[in-house]
């Protein structure tokens, strides 16, 4: 009898551990530590590479339970560089509430990025796409969008 109780208790702990592993593996681990690349220009089209660098930029999965902001841009594009600066500034304010995905349309990092390009990208950069917490399209804006306006759109998607 004691062995059966011990086994049941061990099984319960294992089940809880498995559930926690599943929950943490489903959590949104988007691009983190977003920052501007050194040497990008805000006044002319010069190719110093893609303007944003970050950790985990290959995570392009859509978040569940929180809004997702997808930024599409390209190197050597003045508008992308200026919008990248706005995005990095906004990221510092919303990083715990919003999943951010950054995609270089000229150099997608994986098949997931290609799928997002095919689904949302319409040929204009920069492009900011906001999905609500259920993954439904909330807004899509090409060109430069002021930080305050982008923040308001994110707030509506929450």
Image (tube, rainbow, N blue to C red):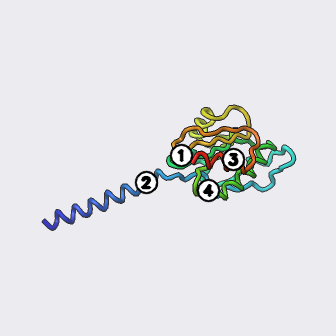
Answer above or below: position of 82 versus 114. Answer: below
User: Which residue is situated farthest in the bottom direction here?
Assistant: 2
Count neighbours of disc 2 (C-alpha within 10 A) and say few if under 14, some if 14 to 19, many if 20 or more.
few
In the drawing, what numbered circle is on residue 95? 4
Number of the front mark, 4 or 2: 4
Query: At 61% across and 36% down in the image, what residue appears?
Result: 114
The residue that mark 3 highlights is 150
In the drawing, what numbered circle is on residue 133? 1
Is the residue under label 1 in contact with that under label 4 (CB below 8 Å)? Answer: no
**Is any atom of residue 106 visible in this view?**
no
Left or right: where 74 falls relative to 1: right
In the drawing, what numbered circle is on residue 23? 2
Left or right: where 143 falls relative to 94: right
The location of residue 127, given as percent across then percent down, is 70, 40
Count neighbours of disc 1 (C-alpha within 10 A) and say few if under 14, some if 14 to 19, many if 20 or more.
some
Q: Secondary structure at mark 4?
A: loop
Q: Secondary structure at mark 3?
A: helix
Instruction: Say whether disc 3 or disc 1 marks the residue closer to the N-terminus.
Output: 1
């Amino acid at each position: 009898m004691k062995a059966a109780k011990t086994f049941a208790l061990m099984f319960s702990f294992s089940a809880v551990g498995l559930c926690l592993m599943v929950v943490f593996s489903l959590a949104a681990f988007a691009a983190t530590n977003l920052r501007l690349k050194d040497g990008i220009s805000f006044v002319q089209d010069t190719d110093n590479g893609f303007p944003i660098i970050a950790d985990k930029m290959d995570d392009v999965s859509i978040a569940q339970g929180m809004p997702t902001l997808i930024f599409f841009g390209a190197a050597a594009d003045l508008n992308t560089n200026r919008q990248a600066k706005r995005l990095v500034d906004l990221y510092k304010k919303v990083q715990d509430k919003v999943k951010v995905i950054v995609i270089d349309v000229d150099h997608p990092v994986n098949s997931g990025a290609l799928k997002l390009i095919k689904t949302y990208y319409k040929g204009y950069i920069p492009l900011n796409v906001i999905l609500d917490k259920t993954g439904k399209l909330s807004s899509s804006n090409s060109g430069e969008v002021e930080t305050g306006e982008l923040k308001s759109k994110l707030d509506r998607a929450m």
